[in-house]
Image: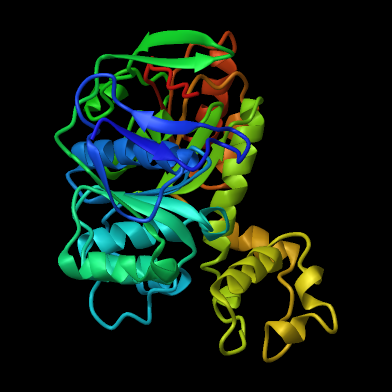
Amino acid sequence: MKELSLKYGCNPNQKPARIFMENGELPLEVLNGRPGYINFLDALNAWQLVKELKQATGLPAAASFKHVSPAGAAVAEPLSDTLRKIYFVDDIADELTPIATAYARARGADRMSSYGDFIALSDECDAMTAQLIKREVSDGVIAPSYSDEALEILRSKRKGSYNVIKIDPSYVPAPVETKQVFGITFEQGRNEVDLTGDDLFTNIPTENKNFTESAKRDLKIALITLKYTQSNSVCYVKDGQAIGIGAGQQSRIHCTRLAGNKADIWWMRQCPKVMALPFKEGIRRADRDNTIDVYIGDEYEDVLREGVWQQFFTQKPEPLTAEEKKAWIAQNTGVCLGSDAFFPFGDNIERAHKSGVQFIAQAGGSVRDDNVIETCDKYGIAMAFTGIRLFHH
């Protein structure tokens, strides 16, 4: 098949719409549903991300994409009991398969942003992963293959309309890519930069030059994630998964703050007081996720007001105090941070430090590199200058 007609483009008024190959066949097959223009943008960017994550780590990988940027990305590191609970997979009696583990991590990191996502899997989608996908609000999934049982499960989702795409894992695109804006064609070489090697960590200008093996892996995950995130962007990673992604901000400090706040929320969800919230039986997953998000934040009164809390809880929870939040967030350590370009000022490091960042990989090359290095040294942070910019638009 050389082309596939779509219902419409980014918006309903944008017709006609299609995806097509000028040479050869499309390297994908729609097994179920009718994916749209944005679905394919998410699917193809997400597939490249998980394919590179597996190449870099050797582990199965998954991504959760929304509006052409990842909401979550992860590799298959085992889940602790705490993570199983906050990712809401603790009801699964059997041990999760590696690809299901990667998916649970990718989906669980920022559940608010992942609502209605498009999923990418580096490996075959098995029945367990399909079961986890089935119970979440999602637009579709792309993977190199599906077990018969998994495909049957996914085809039953959304009254049979769930989008399932099979991608040819051996497909290699042309080295030059084009796009059109305002009727004008742009052309560039594909971004084939290799982010899998330890040569990323040869230029270390900070006093602390000790990058652990796990930190190197997590920084590679951060940089590969940023390669497919709308710029400006930064990514916080811990234990094999993105825990905070800041995308598409005009100011880098705003990226760092946005992603840092997401990382803090991820960590706050592991606070015993949050994990013990007395939710009513039968509450919808999306309502529960939103309630937790509001409870953790500054607008907690919105879910604790009289007449409101009764909709969600069996009894009124005590709010988290500012002191409790600060004390819990201070316990998060060993976090890695990647940036798709240089940090222009040390204020980014100050913000990153508040979210437990101890390792950084960034391009370097700012006129204020000295200020950035000095701020890292103040906190004992190890930082590598990769010399690689990863803008993505």
Up/down of 303 relative to 386, above or below: below
With 316 as the anchor, is 208 left or right in this view?
left
Query: In which quadrant of the rendered view does residue 316 lie?
Result: bottom right
Look at the image and tell me whether residue 213 can be seen: no
Number of on-image labels: 0
Up/down of 290 relative to 60, above or below: below
Image location of residue 265, percent across then percent down? 59, 57
Look at the image and tell me whether residue 181 can be seen: yes
With 303 as the anchor, is 231 left or right in this view?
left
Residue in the foreground of this view, choosing between 6 and 299:
6
Q: Kindly give the residue lying farthest to the left in the view shown.
A: 170
With 387 as the anchor, is 183 left or right in this view?
right
Q: Residue at x 42, y 33 (%)?
A: 18
Query: In which quadrant of the rendered view does residue 77 lie?
Result: bottom left
Image location of residue 293, percent across then percent down? 64, 63
Chosen colour scheme: rainbow
Q: Residue at x 38, y 78 (%)?
A: 90
Residue in the foreground of this view, choosing between 322 and 58:
58
Q: Residue at x 60, y 76 (%)?
A: 273
Up/down of 107 relative to 371, above or below: below
Q: Kindly give the residue lying farthest to the right in the view shown.
A: 306
Image location of residue 321, percent across then percent down? 74, 68
Query: In which quadrant of the rendered view does residue 84 lie?
Result: bottom left
Image location of residue 45, percent across then percent down? 38, 35
Residue in the foreground of this view, choosing between 227 and 175:
175
Quick one: quadrant of the N terminus?
A: top left
Q: Residue at x 23, y 59 (%)?
A: 125
Residue in the foreground of this view, choosing between 305 and 51:
51
